[in-house]
Image (cartoon, helix red, strand yellow):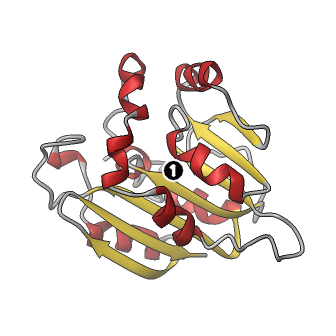
Amino acid sequence: MGFHTFDPESADRLEDESRYRFCSREELVAALDLGAGGGEREAAVADFGSGTGFYTDDVAPFAGELRAVDVQEEMHETYREKGVPENVELVTADIDDLPFGDAELDAAFSTMTFHEFAGSGTDDGAGAEVEVARVLRDGGRFVVVDWSANGSGDGGPPVEERYSRDEAVELLEDAGFDVVRADERPETFLVIAER
């Protein structure tokens, strides 16, 4: 996969609240399981493929620090115009080459972008999901909500550019994740994996 990135000229579409029909803010925050602030420290989280920060803004109140990672600086420019929460750092990087240390993050998520970066990466066939595993601490969660190859293709990218839930699970397990939940939906899938 990894065929394209989202067109920055259409960035306003990323702010459409109808996106919550695919994944609500409550579902995403619950899936990340960041706790209620009762831990020793607040969680370090990353949003991979953050775009204009639509879901980043939803998770930010529950994280100590949140890295909004996107390969396109134009998306960060749009996010800055909208207003970035104080605990959010904008990071321009490819997911297969993250500027984070080993086990630096407590959790990460990708909403509707997994198909753009999964399976890409190193010459040995290891995908960006291996890099995600590297930057997550043991027990850290990676939540993926993406367009399903089993969907109709009416919304989102063409079906041939998508992964099925089972393909996503296989990629994540091959990268060293334990999948704790994998749901197929009419147009999308949700996978919760732990490092």
Q: Quadrant where the C terminus lies?
A: bottom right
Q: State the image coordinates of residue 164 (x, y, percent, origin top left).
A: 24, 64
Q: Is residue 71 above or below residue 47?
A: above
Left or right: residue 117 versus residue 74 is: left
Q: Quadrant of residue 138?
A: bottom right
Q: Secondary structure at mark 1?
A: loop
Query: Which residue appears at 41% of the width and 80% of the height?
Result: 181
Nearest the camera: 103 or 120? 103
Q: Is residue 93 above or below residue 7?
A: below
Q: State the image coordinates of residue 175 (x, y, percent, origin top left).
A: 51, 70
Residue with the mark numbered 1: 122
Query: Which residue appears at 89% of the width and 74% of the height?
Result: 40
Q: State the image coordinates of residue 31 (x, y, percent, origin top left).
A: 52, 71
Q: Is residue 1 above or below residue 166?
A: above
Query: Which residue appears at 37% of the width and 67% of the height?
Result: 190
Q: Quadrant of residue 131?
A: bottom right
Nearest the camera: 159 or 36? 36
> Mark 1: few, some, or many residues within 10 Å (few <14, many ≥20)?
few
Left or right: residue 125 versus residue 136 is: left
Query: Which residue appears at 44% of the width and 61% of the height?
Result: 144
Left or right: residue 135 versus residue 64 is: left
> Across the whole image, how many numbered discs are drawn on residues?
1
